[in-house]
Image: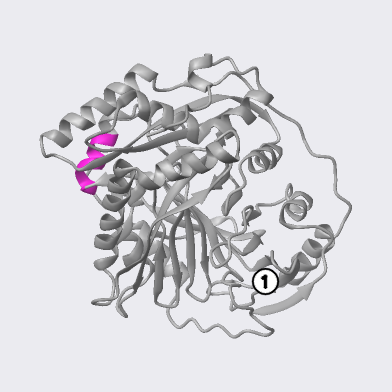
Amino acid sequence: MSIRPVALPDGPRGTMARLRGDAHYALLESALAMPGQAEWSYIAGPSLATLYTDEDSTRLRRAGHEDVQWADPFEALQAVAAPAGRRVCVDGERLPGMNFTGGWVGLLGYDLARSVERLPTLARHDPPLPRSWWMAVDQVLAFHHASGRWWHCTARGPQDRWPWTTRDRPAVWTRTLARAAAPLGVAGAWSAGPRKLRTSRAEFEAGVQRIRNAIAAGEVLQVNLTRREEAAFSGDAWSLYEDLVAAHPAPFAAYLDGPGFTVASCSPERFLHLRGDEVQARPIKGTAARGRDAREDAAQRQWLADSQKDRAENLMIVDLMRNDLGRVAQTGSVQVSELFALEPYASVWQMVSTVRARLRADCGVAQLLRACWPPGSMTGAPKPRAMQMIEALEPVRRGWYAGALGYLDCGGDMDLAVLIRSAVVSDGRVMLQFGGGIVADSEPAAEWVETVAKGERLARVLDRGGDGSLSEAAVAPAPSRSG
């Protein structure tokens, strides 16, 4: 591994705008920098190989053909991310926090849950996206937001194992730097048609009531219920990402362009961060709309801080994450280091807690992901019954939404964000999805309003590109209290 400082004329978004187009690159952007959490941005690519999971198996594809197949997607990721006999030698300074210098970058879809639990098949698979998709990268541009400096990271290895170095790679790296320093081109245009609801308000509120009935019957404690909006899409998905992140800056924003799909994410939620044997999860549960002025905003924050419903909702998921991590953690190492913290975002206040643990020596990426998948904040508790109810109440599978996006570094580190506040472009459509945790005292109408508050900024961006035909009641800002 070689790490060298490099001078580039722009920040992460401007540099990505120069690079994209002729190959698959990914941008992992700390668009809302947070000390100790989101301080670096990374541009990774072009890809050397891809690892993807369909309904039947997981396949590694490189040099135009399939190399290996696995029945278990988590074991596949473990095999490619941490091959036997791996040894990483670093030439250059790897600064604190520079945790991604080469490896794999990609997506885990919510439907990988079917590799963990036996679930009914009721919801429609639309569009038919892979269950996971990763690309191997031997080149990463790392940007440190506090200093405004770039580093160029490249990896070489034997041809029979990652990173499968070939003679042309140094030329690829040189061309990447030249393009990253070239004049910035004209941004492409995009347009979206009127948004359509895949779940009506009446259907969503009926789903909330069904969950409340199940809670009263002792079947479940909490269920995360979501709904999708979509619109016809044409044009440049990168320009859509730029508009979305400008309206909704987030600490774990990302742009990934894969075969037949694009993901533009403004996620505020870290799912799992693995550094050595230290694991961190930061589940988000609890929402209040931002105020229209400083006084109202402070009142909104205080309302969320005092909300017993939101605290209960958050605590259930904290307990779920503690239980998940406890399956693979060293005895006594699972701790809640922060409980009910409040964080401001463009359109909402969020309640965030932090759970930490130390991974057991006999556990790796595969065991950690299997123990925690899907993200607990996106299922409910207990997980198996909550996921069964999600399958019955949501008419279409979640696909990438409610999954995770991030990296697996060649040194073994991992950082994944929950795919929420995100747009997925595929099959000539752009899709948004919003939801919330339903508990015993959830009010159906208030839960609908909360989904509107969470999606307000992103939906407005689409409406500026289209004609915004949803009714005023559906897109109006949330009132002063959103449960």
Q: Quadrant of the N terminus?
A: bottom right
Q: How many marks?
A: 1
Look at 51% across and 40% down and name the residue there. Answer: 348
Residue 29 at what x, y percent from top left? 63, 55
Q: Is residue 268 visible?
A: no
Tag 1: Cα neighbours inside 10 Å, few (<14), some, or many (≥20)?
Answer: few
Q: Tag 1: residue type?
A: Thr
Q: Quadrant of the C terminus?
A: top left
Is residue 199 covered in magenta?
A: no
Residue 79 at what x, y percent from top left? 41, 69
Magenta part of the protein: which range?
382-390
Look at 65% across and 41% down and name the residue there. Answer: 241
Q: Main secondary structure of the magenta part?
A: helix
Residue 477 at what x, y percent from top left? 53, 26
Residue 154 at what x, y percent from top left? 68, 73
* Image quarter of residue 74: bottom left
Which residue position is annotated with label 1? Answer: 166
Q: Residue furthest right?
A: 183
Q: Quick one: 15 or 214, which is closer to the camera? A: 214
Q: Residue furthest left?
A: 217
Which color scheme does this rendered protein use? one colour
* In this view, 259 is above or below 158: above
Circle 1 — which element? loop
Q: Is residue 266 visible?
A: yes
Look at 55% across and 36% down and name the residue there. Answer: 291
Horizontally, residue 352 falls left or right of residue 97, namely left
